[in-house]
Image (spheres, rainbow, N blue to C red):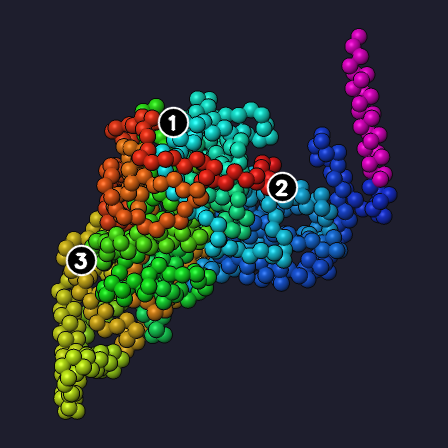
Amino acid sequence: MSTYPRYWLLQVAAALAVGAVLVWCCWKNSGTQNFHLLVASDEEMGEYIPDQDVDIATTQAFAKKDTLYADFRQNFRFHYQTIGEATFDDGSCLLLISEPPPFFKADTLKQIFAQFTHTLETKKHRVGYDGEITDLMLLLGNATRENLDRLEKELSQALYLSDYKPHVTPLPVQHGRSYFVDDNIDYQITLYEFNDWFMDKDEEFIQLPDTVKTVTVEKMFADKLTGVYFSKLPGFVAWAIAKKHDLSEQLNHIRQFTLDADLILGALADSSTLVIIGRERQSKLYELPPLNVESILLLASVTEKELSQSLDVNDFMAGKMKSGHDWCPTYLSKELENTEFGHLMTITDVLLKDWSENGTIQEAFYRYPSPPRFPFDRPLFKKLGLSELVYNWNTWNAMYAIDMDEGFTIYTLNRTGSLPVSYFNSPERSVSVGYRYENQAYNYFATLGNTDLARVVQYTALYQLFMDNGITYSGKLGNVFPSNKPYLLYSPTRNLMDFFKNLTDKQIDWLADTLSAKIYADYQKKQVTKQMAQYESSYNFKYTDEQRADIYSKVSKDERNTLRAEIAGIKAMLSGLGEADYKQLARYLAYPRGMRQAGGVNYQLAMRARRLNMLMRRIGKNNLSIIGLDLASVRNFYVNSLAKSASPYLKTPSVIVTYNDMLTTGGHNLSSGITRVHSLTGYKRGGGGYQSYPQAQATPSRPSGGTPTAGTTPKTSGGSGSGGGSKSGTTARTTTSSAKPASTSKPAQNIRPRSEVISTAARAQRGF
């Protein structure tokens, strides 16, 4: 008969004895019989749960909660996702969950904290004019350090789909968010260097905790490996993902990669596996925060080949209010509404305009820190002397790819510091104002060390890599698109059209007289006086008082007659339209983007809309109060109509309010297309023109914009979208070059060793 059952009984008896001793010790040391013993696992015999007979309202955590929250959001005014913690002498604790992902259910907290006396509060933090972040604050009556460590690990799993390195921010805040960093975050690593480091020289990687077994990228390809790997020599983190698969199969790897890699540098792929290469974290989390897991899943879920963001300042009902401030609706592709990435694009769009204009165009509610310098010696709008200007972030040559003969593809980012910049003469004509200005701006923004601009580059790179390699996500995300937003301004637009259509001749005369007098007093007289002074100075001539009076009278009369003719012409045009055309015009003016995307804009419709917009410019939208319309009321209607359209914890601003704005528009045009080239060297490197292979440099550089030189023409798989660049292409989910070069191609100049580009200094903590 086997002795195994007897041995098993002895083990059970021993375990019971140990348990009895542990229970007695807990009771002995606690001074009370009110305790709980939680059996957690084979490794962890038990966890002491202290007395929970606590009134939360009497705790130190409760007394300090509002002060701690205000301090946190003062230091992190925009997006920052973390678990904040403050512990107190009475055993109470405050846990702050900032910006929970939209898929997180608050009821989950009841399950995690079921054994503890706790209360839950929601805290609202305003971002922009009407944007809002909802944070969760949990107060615990009594908990030990051991309790908190376990709870925070469970929280991390629920929030970030991984309990890897559950990071906690001590409260009160010790280090606020860094918007500018001194260390270089603008890398320009070439395709040839990636090929040399990872394929020719076979950079070795390990997957912790095993530090002995090594693999190369080629080994990852051959064995179809997935997961997160560290380079054996510190410097790189690789995230291997199965291509043409759903990310739901690999969720636990996302958070690890975002914590251990602080910048995405490029990628390599074969037919089965995509290996994304990141810089092993050398920045603090408050400098380059981990990319949000939900934003990465969002990008994998996108099926559209282009994503867009803009500030629609030229819309019919947008513009200058009576207060002198300008307002406009924000636009985001439907996938980006009420998301961190979408709002990040809006913020950086504001920065593009403001900093291009030397800080003279400011958003009234963001209060983003000012940069140490500006890109031009004076505001670009005045420097160019244009009547209108379009500013765009785009993806034209933001990433390069080359398909090698050996059956793999190499991807590298042009620059990691920012996306390329485009400046256009007008929204209708996507004609560049000149590569000189675009290159200068691209170099400025990329080398500024702004952490939000670098974050946009990383998200954009993931979007392009996911699209190019068939990586998807079909799970629920929880973000909400406000379906009522697109034609929300139809009613006020039609009301204003009705006003002009129904004017009598007497009302037209009164309106022309009143408006021309105001325009003359506010603007024209000053301009005429200035012109007369310039003429007198140039020709040594002096106007008499009578001559001046005659000129002023003529200018005022001409303005009155011109206004009357334009208003009468608009009335006649509107009166001659049938109901279908009238409605179509109102819809186009209310939401021009919608009809353009639907292909419903013909020449006649565009010309009618142009005439109405020209009339609004001549009148001056801040003068509409003369007819009883202040655009502030339109803005309020728009904002109030969208007040409840939000994700569970985030509402992106529906409007932007600026001051000192001109006729300037801008936005992001993010294409999934990647510029594919036929050579490892000599491909397009700058915002414009072709550049030769860069010389070896001892440190990651922040070079100035290069001079265009001859090179090999790249093939672009994807363009920069409508208005996204001065060149265009066709988008495709996966495209390949017709000619595949061999990896043995040699550069025109010396290759940089990886140790001269990426620091090999030991990191504080690798892995768990």
Among numbered discs 2 and 3, the one appearing first in the sequence: 2
For residue 36, side relative to residue 155 (left or right): right
Q: Is residue 24 magenta?
A: yes
* Residue located at (85% from left, 35% from top): 21
Q: Could you tell which of marks 3 and 1 lies nearer the N-terminus? A: 1
> The disc labelled 3 sits on which kind of residue?
Ala
Q: Is residue 404 above or below residue 257?
A: above
The answer to which of 556 and 590 lies nearer the viewer is 556
Residue 675 disc label: none
Q: Which residues are magenta?
A: 1-25
Rendering coords of residue 357 (x, y %): 33, 63
Residue 265 horizontal/vertical position (percent): 42, 40
Q: Nearer the viewer, residue 380 or 320?
A: 380
Q: Which residue is mark 2?
A: 153
What is the quadrant of the N terminus in the image?
top right
Which residue is under mark 3?
A: 606
Q: Residue at x 27, y 32 (%)?
A: 678
Direction from residue 192 to residue 551 in the image, left or right = left
Rounded to the nearest angstrom, the CA distance separating label 2 from label 3 is 58 Å
Q: Is residue 564 visible?
A: no
If the image is split into quadrants, where does the C terminus sit?
top right
Q: Secondary structure at mark 3?
A: helix
Of 480 and 756, nearer the camera is 756
Q: For the residues marked 3 and 1, what is the alpha-carbon distance in whole angstroms?
A: 48 Å
Q: Is residue 240 visible?
A: yes
Estimate the x, y position of residue 582 in percent, counting from the top left. Answer: 19, 61
